[in-house]
Amino acid sequence: MHRVRRLTNTKMRRSGGRAARRTEGVISAASRSACPAVRLPVAFLLSCTPITTRPDFRPDPRALVVILNARPERVTAALDSLVPAESLEIAHANVQDGYVETAWYDTQARRTRHHEREITNLAATVRIRFWADPWVPGQTRLTVEPVYRPRYDPSRPERDLEVIASKEHEGYKIAQRFVDKLKEKFGVPKAAQEEGRPTPPPSPSPTPP
């Protein structure tokens, strides 16, 4: 009798051990199968996080704006040749983001300044930024921002010191030349042309007889 009980207990312990091992195996397998389900959404979210090379500020409201008959990618790519033609250098450019930024340029010396120590005339040294944004299909709203810094202060962010160039400033004139060349290259939608025209005076009322 005792021998039968011992055999039964031994079988139960063995079967229990196998059951426990099977249970642990099921839990481990479930854990392994659950982990990818947790990791995949995270990886998916990370892959969908927007990454842009554009600065984290918007253009000055007084910047030049033009509507062009071309997609942003074409406009941005065209600046790659137009900027050097004006003796300026491109510091940052990304066709997909529709963004171009020049290095600092001394409009009097007509030289690019790569380092702060090279800038001797702050008021005459400008940087021009271009934002090419989609407008209606096949068109681009291009914003051109020429800025300079009246003073230099390393303790403050560079953007805080920048001032939009006035229409009399040589930097603004360079920016206007870029706009004119792009308008000539791509054309301007008819609606934008009409918006830029002065409103004609009303017709005089007929004189009663």
Image (spheres, rainbow, N blue to C red):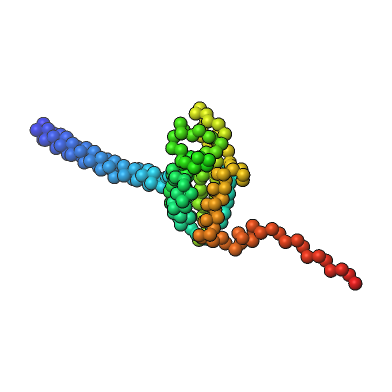
Residue 167: quarter of image: top right
Residue 32 versus residue 155: which sits nearer the camera? 155
Residue at image position (46%, 38%) is 113
Q: Quadrant of the N terminus?
A: top left
Out of 197 and 46, give the one closest to the viewer. Answer: 197
Observer-nearest residue: 116 or 200?
116
Quadrant location of the C terminus in the rendered image: bottom right
What residue occupies the far bottom of the structure in this picture? 209
Instruction: Write the residue at 83% across / 66% down.
Output: 205
- Give the percent coordinates (x, y) of residue 57: 52, 41
Q: In the rendered image, is residue 56 in sight?
A: no
Q: Residue furthest top?
A: 155
Q: Residue furthest left?
A: 3
The residue at 47%/44% (across/down) is 102
Up-down: is 158 above or below 140? above
**Furthest residue toward right:** 209
Q: Disc count in the image?
A: 0
Residue 197: where, in percent of width, then height? 66, 59
Q: Is residue 25 visible?
A: yes
In percent of width and height, residue 72 lies at 48, 55
Residue 171 at x, y = what percent? Answer: 55, 44
Q: Residue at x 34, y 43 (%)?
A: 39
